[in-house]
Each structure stands twice: as structure tokens, then as C-alpha cells.
Image (spheres, helix red, strand yellow):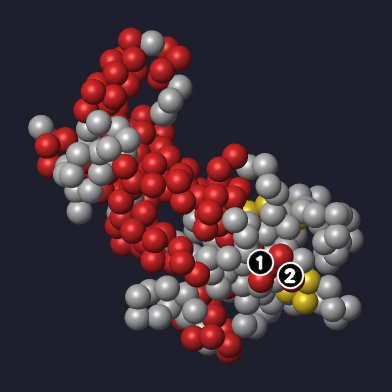
Amino acid sequence: MLKDEVSPPSTLFPTAVREVIQRNYSRFEWARSWVDLAGAEKTLTEWGDAKTLWLLVPSQDVGRAMGSAPWYPPCPACGRNASYRAVDPLRSWQVECVHCKARFPANDFDAFFESGRDEQGIFRRELANPNLLVERSDAPIPAVDDGTGWVDSKGQRHFFVPVACRERWFRLISFLHQWARAFVITDDIRFARATLSLLFRIAQVYPSMDFAPYAKLGAFESYGHKRVGANLRSHWRDGSKQWFVRRHTMPSSPL
Ligand SMILES: [Zn+2]
């Protein structure tokens, strides 16, 4: 049995509890909404490789921000209220204006990000190559973002990469949620391994995560996003600890 490879036994999800969950899942429609197994399988195939996960997790040195806030300066391309969404946050650091679809930032932040990995592969802004902070020749607005936003000629800060980063965190946390539950239902060790690889990587960057420096720069983060929102605010340490522990005890420790 695959689950016998997993030790020590899960404390929050002991065998008896897992069996009840598995039984309900097989019998009842309402229980099946607990996890989308097809979706979990798809994201596992696409993103569940340990090295891929390792490289995806950002560090404290990439800001987080919501895509809009009353005090944000307007979109530099169309002048309408700032409202940005990530284009494809696991593959790109770009966001687009919801009104005019202009994309920001103008630089290749990924190149800067890759140049700033330390010996553990964790991004440190001070290690990154500043020569890579240049706008593409075809960029309509020379909005260069080093991970903390772009400051325009009026001294106003626009959050681009931090919006994409926030979305990346949401996706990664949703993977934990999805894979941990998929493991409880299926006992498929691949879900446990991916969950734990991702948790391990998050644990490496976790101690230095703090939203406060970005809040000081004007970044906004809502408070009401269930448990996940707390991760990205100054409550990162307190609010999310229990949640992460819960995810960790689902698959226990096969690594
Ligand atoms: Zn716009």
C-alpha cells in the first residue's frame, strides 16, 4: 500500500478519519466537492515536479500587492483607475491593465529574478544584476520594476511585479490545498511528495516573509481572503502557521 510508505502517521488526519473522508467521497456528491481530483492531477502533472516548485517560490524580496487600491496612481498607459491582474503568474511576472490591456512592467523581471538567486536558489534583490533593469525597446511606458514596483516621474509608485507575485502565491497555496486533499482521498504518494516539496521550499523563505515593508511603500492587501490573505499581510507569521501545519499533517512526511 502506498500509504504505508508515509511515516510518521498523520496526527490531524489519522487513518480512521481518512477512511471516513474516503468513504464519503465515494458515496456522496457533496463530499466530492471537497477536492477536484482531475484538477489536482492536471496541476500535479504540470507543476508538481520538485525542481519546478523549488524555482517557483518567490522570497520576501519580491513584493506583494493587490491589483487595485483607492490610493494607487492611475494606469500610466490609459490614465484610468489602477486595476491590474496577473497575465499568467506561474510563467510570467507581467500584469495587464483591466481597462486598456497594456502590460507592465517594461523590463524582463524574470531575467533579473534569475540573476538574483543565492546559493539556496532564493531570490535576493541585492544579488541581482541591476544592468537587467532596462525596458524593452518596444515598451510603450518605460516602467521598470525591480520587484518593489515602478516609481514614475512624479514619484508615484505603481505595483506591477508585486501584483503578479501575489497571484503566484495564491496559485502555489491553492496547489497545497488541492494536492493535500487529493492525497487524503487517493493515497497517491505523488500528491504527498509534491505537497511536501512545496511546503519545504515555503518553509525556507517563510521566516523572512513580512508584508510591512511593502505596506509602507503603499501596497495594499485585503484582509478578508480567508486564510490565504493573512499570508500576504503583516500577519504572515501568525495567521498562516496553523494553516500550513494542517496542510503538512495531511500527507505526513514521506521525504
Ligand atoms: Zn490602462
**Rendering coords of residue 210 (x, y %):** 58, 65
Task: Give the quadrant of the N terminus.
Answer: top left
Q: Are marks 1 and 2 in contact (CB under 8 Å)?
A: yes
At 62% from the left and 82% from the top, the residue drawn is 133
Q: Residues within 10 Å of mark 2 (few under 14, many from 20)?
A: few
Q: Is residue 99 left or right of residue 125?
A: right
Q: Which residue occupies 12% across, 37% down?
A: 4
Instruction: Report x, y in % for residue 53.
Output: 37, 58
Q: Residue at x 41, y 37 (%)?
A: 178
Residue depicted at 82% across the width and 61% down the height: 72
Q: Nearer the viewer, residue 130 or 11?
A: 11
Q: Which residue lies under the disc numbered 2?
A: 216
The amino acid beneath tag 1 is Ala
Residue 78 makes an appearance in the image: no
Q: Is residue 218 above or below residue 249?
A: below
Q: Viewer-proximal residue, 189 or 6? A: 6
**184 horizontally vs 176: left or right:** left
- Which element type, helix, strand or loop, lies under badge 2? helix
Visible in this render: residue 220?
yes
**Mark 2 is on which residue type?**
Lys
- How far apart marks 1 and 2 lie (CA) works out to 6 Å
Instruction: Residue under label 1, please give it.
Output: 212
Secondary structure at numbered mark 1: helix
**Up-down relation of residue 2 to residue 222 (above or below):** above
Query: Left of 17 or right of it: where is 68?
Result: right
Dot 1 surroundings within 10 Å: few (below 14), some, or many (20 or more)?
A: some
